[in-house]
Image (tube, rainbow, N blue to C red):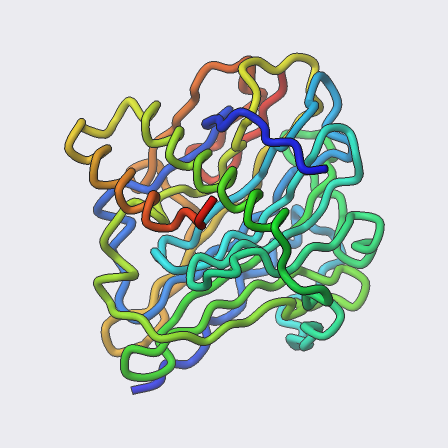
Amino acid sequence: MYRQPTPGGVGYGLFYTPAFKTAWGRGTSFSCDYVCPSPPGGNVNTWLYLTATNRAGLGVEALVAYNGQGTPQFMVFDWARTDHWQTNIPFTSLGNYLTTTSAHGYPYPTLPVWNSTWMIGQDQYRNQALLYNHVRGGWDLVYQYDYSATDAQQKSGWIGSWSPIVETFQSVYVNTNPMGALTTQLISADNNGLWGNWALLAAPDSYVRTDNVGFHLVFLDPNYAFIVTS
Amino acid sequence: MPSEPPPEPPARTEERPGRPPGGPIVDMREAFERKTPHTDEDQARTRTFVQGKIEMIRRDPYLTDEQKAAAIAELEGRLPPP
């Protein structure tokens, strides 16, 4: 039976500045390594998401979903569709994708993700989500959706404003395992469809937000990497 | 008019030892695609997901009241019927 948790907020995370959110032409693409312990530990007893957008208003959230201390899942929520929930894969089936990444001298369990939104025709866009297959050494396309939209739909509005965040659904957290995101980077296509270069998320293009629900910072590399615990 | 897909993110071999740069993209959508129809539980979870975003907006210390109202209206338009 579905149990509806209390809607929540941001345990810790990054948001794009309004200028950076719209600073792309025909395409925007995002990649990071979610630091995603299994289980989340502590007092997590309902939903908790590690999620991010690529700045597009109708892009996808390729996210890690916790529900209590159960097996985490990789999920895709597509803002371009009405049947939003698409991919739903438990961590037990992600052996080729879950890996370990070192940061600040410590190994962290990570899931490298890459999602993109770009124009494929007049008022036609494509959303993609990919996972890095560390066994064969390449990205695997796990989700794709083509749809009609306008430039204004992609760039106006609030959806698409969050970079990696710990999205919370409880009033307080204690003793959770380290979680967050590493190597957050983006790339933009200009108004001619030409892609620039990947660049780490920079401090001038983003800002930190925390709703003070118990998470505290282990480290922040402004602003492309952070780890929090509670 | 059509744009090419984005280039791959650069390899960060110092953080992912042994990762070769620029391997081919393999289409694994069939393995990952949703196999079951959407359910009432999906609708309920969507409501919770979107309501969570609305709460994020309400708590955002950087948005003005006008910006919050516009953002909440945007999200409320995405809520599925109860």
User: Residue at point 60% right, 68% down?
Assistant: A143
User: Residue at point 34% right, 23% down?
Assistant: B59
Quarter the C terminus of chain A occupies? top right
Asked where in the image residue B19 lies, by quadrant, the reply is bottom right
Please name whichever residue, A116 or B24, is drawn nearer the observer in this view of the structure: A116
Asked where in the image residue A114 lies, by quadrant, the reply is bottom right
Quarter the N terminus of chain A occupies? top right
Most extreme residue toward the left, as rendered? B66
Q: Position of residue B5 (x, y in %)?
A: 46, 76
User: Residue at point 60% right, 60% down?
Assistant: A86
Please name whichever residue, A188 or A215, is drawn nearer the observer in this view of the structure: A215
Q: Position of residue B9 (x, y in %)?
A: 53, 62
Number of labels in the image equals: 0
Q: Position of residue A147 (x, y in %)?
A: 41, 74
Please name whichever residue, A222 or B66, is drawn nearer the observer in this view of the structure: B66
Most extreme residue toward the bottom, as rendered? B1
Up/down of A88 relative to A130, above or below: above
Up/down of A133 relative to A207, above or below: below
Q: Position of residue A190 (x, y in %)?
A: 27, 70
Please name whichever residue, A62 or B65, is drawn nearer the observer in this view of the structure: B65
**Is B65 positioned to the left or the right of A77 in the image?**
left
**Is A53 positioned to the left or the right of B15 in the image?**
left
Up/down of A198 relative to B75, above or below: below
